[in-house]
Image (cartoon, rainbow, N blue to C red):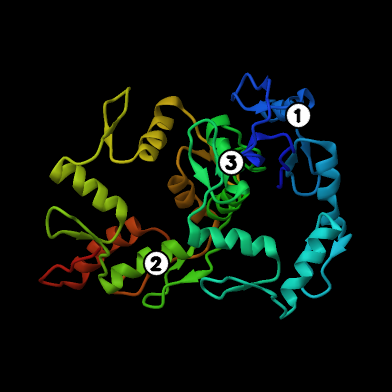
Amino acid sequence: MEIKTQANDITQHPRDDKPRPYVCTVCDKRFTLKGSLNVHSRRHTEDNWYSCTQCEKRFHSQSSLSSHTNVHSSKYKCTECGKCFQRSEGLMKHKLSHSEERPFECSVCGKRFTQSSNLAVHSRIHSGEKPYKCHVCGKAFSQSTNLNTHMRVHTEERPYKCSLCNKCFSQSSNLQKHQRHIHSNRRPYQCPYCGMQFKTSDHLKRHVRVHTDAKPYSCRHCSDRFRRHDLLKRHLLKSHNEGTWFTCDVCEKKFAARRELKLHSFQHEGVKPYVCSECPKRFCTASQLNVHHLVHSAYKQFCCILCCKYFKQKRSVKSHFKKCFNKLGFSHPFLLV
């Protein structure tokens, strides 16, 4: 969903000195016109969103929703690749991407662009210029879109809502990741070593390190190395007292990451935000939901190395392996990881 920023929004005019007497009472954002403040205020009111009936994206105004529906009607559709746009200007700019003509060249690295605006944004990589500054915390950005996204940290605005579990997100990309990882059983990424399949390329990369024994994360205090960054962070806390533990107020259990504490707190609160797409069952964490998904799937990814029998869960193959080991009468135990 694209939410257009108002012309009187301070995030679009970081350098002007216009008086902005109209202040949002929720997030302290300032505006030159009262009408602009009224439009902005809808962001903080759940009832004043305009939802698309085809994809459930939400907008602050009826006009923005009307423009969005052009994407579904294919009114402005590229004949080369089939991509659809809200407006004719967007389609015209996109068509340049199918042309080899790139008249705008970066004087520093020689990279060429179809539009001068793209070159201007790219040039800030070399200059370090960040003209768009947050008026709340002072953080600066090279693009206005990045600033608009950042502002949701302060406003706690989360306009992208999952239609399956009602969880909300500040960015559409995070919603898409959530739907792929949590509500889909599709595993397109396969390990070239053992054939194990994963939902994301990042999960596959982490898994491959089990086979290659790659440990890219090293401790600066000792010679220990780790496959994952979270394991390094936990090591720094336990062995070198570096960092901050996050402690549960209810049971005083300690966690190395704030996210782990948040997931743990769901158990005390009885919150179960993760809903199975196949049945009504709900779960506190994504990992619990992923384990449950195996009930609805015929896929078995764990194999016993002794008898080649396959299992859905790692704990099942571990339990089976011990029985199989004793049954076959081996004198020395294997290491099963």
- State whether residue 199 appears in this view: no
Image quarter of residue 313? bottom left
Residue at the image point whose x is 43% and y is 48% from the top = 287
Spatial separation of the CA atoms under disc 1 and disc 3: 24 Å
Q: Earlier in the sequence, mark 3 or mark 2?
A: 3
The x, y position of residue 75, in whole percent, is 89, 60
Q: Relative to 138, does residue 224 appear above or below in the rendering?
A: below
Q: Identify the amino acid type marked 1.
A: Ser
Q: Residues within 10 Å of mark 2 (few under 14, many from 20)?
A: few
Kindly state the secondary structure of the residue where label 2 is placed.
helix
Spatial separation of the CA atoms under disc 3 and disc 2: 26 Å
Residue annotated with mark 1: 36
Residue at the image point whose x is 66% and y is 41% from the top = 12
Kindly state the secondary structure of the residue where label 3 is placed.
strand
Residue annotated with mark 2: 205
Q: Earlier in the sequence, mark 1 or mark 3?
A: 1
In this rendering, position of residue 274 left or right of residue 3: left
Compare residues 300 and 32 and report the one nearer the observer. 32
Q: Relative to 123, does residue 174 appear above or below in the rendering?
A: above
Q: Quadrant of the C terminus?
A: bottom left
Image quarter of residue 83? bottom right
Check if mark 2's residue and mark 1's residue have beta carbons within 8 Å.
no
Residue annotated with mark 3: 169
Q: Identify the amino acid type marked 3.
A: Phe
Spatial separation of the CA atoms under disc 2 and disc 1: 47 Å
Compare residues 306 and 74 and report the one nearer the observer. 74
